[in-house]
Amino acid sequence: MSRYRQVQTFAAVAQAGSLAAAARQLGQSPATVMRTIAALEARLQTSLLMRGPRGVALSPAGEQFAQSCRLVLEQTAQAERSAAGMHASPDGQLTVALPLLMDLQVFTPIAVAYLNAFPDVRLDIRACEGVPKLLKEGIDIALVLGQLPNSSEFAVPLGAVRPIVCASPAYLGKWGRPSTPEDLKAHRAVATNAAGYDAHWHFRCGRSIRSVKPTPALTCTTQRAAIHAATLGLGLIRCMSYEAHDELRRGLLEPVLSAFAGPDVPVQLIYRHGRRAEARVRTFIDFAAPQLRAHPAFQAR
């Protein structure tokens, strides 16, 4: 069996997390898949899979080799498409990762316009936290917040967002407008227990950071629900400016404590391969980046 076929088989097992699932995907028997992996491990003289009663898992060497396999297979497929004259024409699936609520507040109209302009592309939008690992997670482009770690990805700056505290006009009319973070002790709050949202609210007070943990009147499972509850007058909410962009624009929420807001957070698109990126990646960057830069949600100041 060729080395390339061994790499294909191992990559399928690593992605599926199961010999049987990989066998179904490849149209082979589990015994054939097992023999292929055994031959690959013998050739490399290392164990790639850890076998147990619940199935298989990647060994540390297998984790590293799986990333290399994905890169090899991706580059091979790209070379074949380029040789066939497909590289210049955007088509196929484009996977884009976004922070939570970015699709609702900012991204969807731009995505629809892109698909109307390039109807042969299929767009798969995924929610993510932090900076995803593009190659490992099978993501073409990611819109990320914050400073980027050193990596091989290319970055396109879009603007900035900021953390804010806001409430509905009805709430502020009833409970008053807080002037300092200390005033929050006399206010009601709405919070979320979803991953990635801190129970402490951080404020910039001169050169120091002040942390306050308000007692929420309501804790929601999603930030979207918490923002909606705040528009109904239940209490103050802390969020990123883009998360409540539409509610702020329509006057359903008003910012407070702006003088104590934390620093702006940069926003950027990241992708791989630069000018060698596939046509659907390059056309999306060229199409979406100017619109995202011009979007008021990314004009933090």
Image (tube, rainbow, N blue to C red):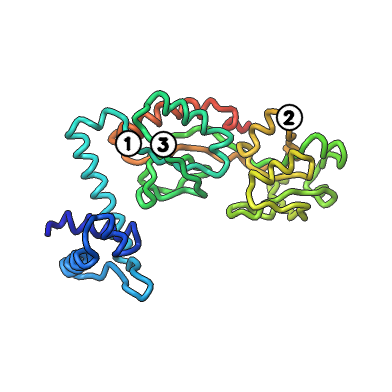
Locate residue 299, reporting x and y percent: 59, 30
Rendered view: 194 above or below 43: above
Q: Residues within 10 Å of mark 1 (few under 14, many from 20)?
A: few
Q: Residues within 10 Å of mark 3 (few under 14, many from 20)?
A: some
The residue positioned farthest toward the bottom in the image shown: 53
Q: Which residue is mark 3?
A: 123
Q: Secondary structure at mark 3?
A: strand
Q: Residue visible at 37% across and 48% down?
A: 138
The residue positioned farthest toward the top in the image shown: 117
Q: Secondary structure at mark 2?
A: loop
Sequence-wise, which precedes: disc 2 or disc 3?
Answer: 3
Label 1 – label 3 distance at C-alpha: 9 Å
Rendered view: 284 above or below 95: above
Q: Secondary structure at mark 1?
A: strand
User: Residue 92 bears which disc, if any?
Assistant: 1
Locate residue 146, reporting x and y percent: 53, 44
Q: Amino acid at mark 2?
A: Gly
User: Residue 251 bears which disc, if any?
Assistant: 2
Pick whichever, 151 or 93, lies toward us: 93
Report the quarter where the N terminus lies.
Answer: bottom left
Looking at the image, residue 236 sits to the left or right of residue 161; the answer is: right
Rendered view: 132 above or below 141: below
Looking at the image, residue 276 sits to the left or right of residue 270; the answer is: left
Sequence-wise, which precedes: disc 1 or disc 3?
Answer: 1
Q: Residue visible at 32% across and 36% down?
A: 92
Contact, mark 2 vs mark 3 (Cβ under 8 Å): no
The count of marks equals: 3
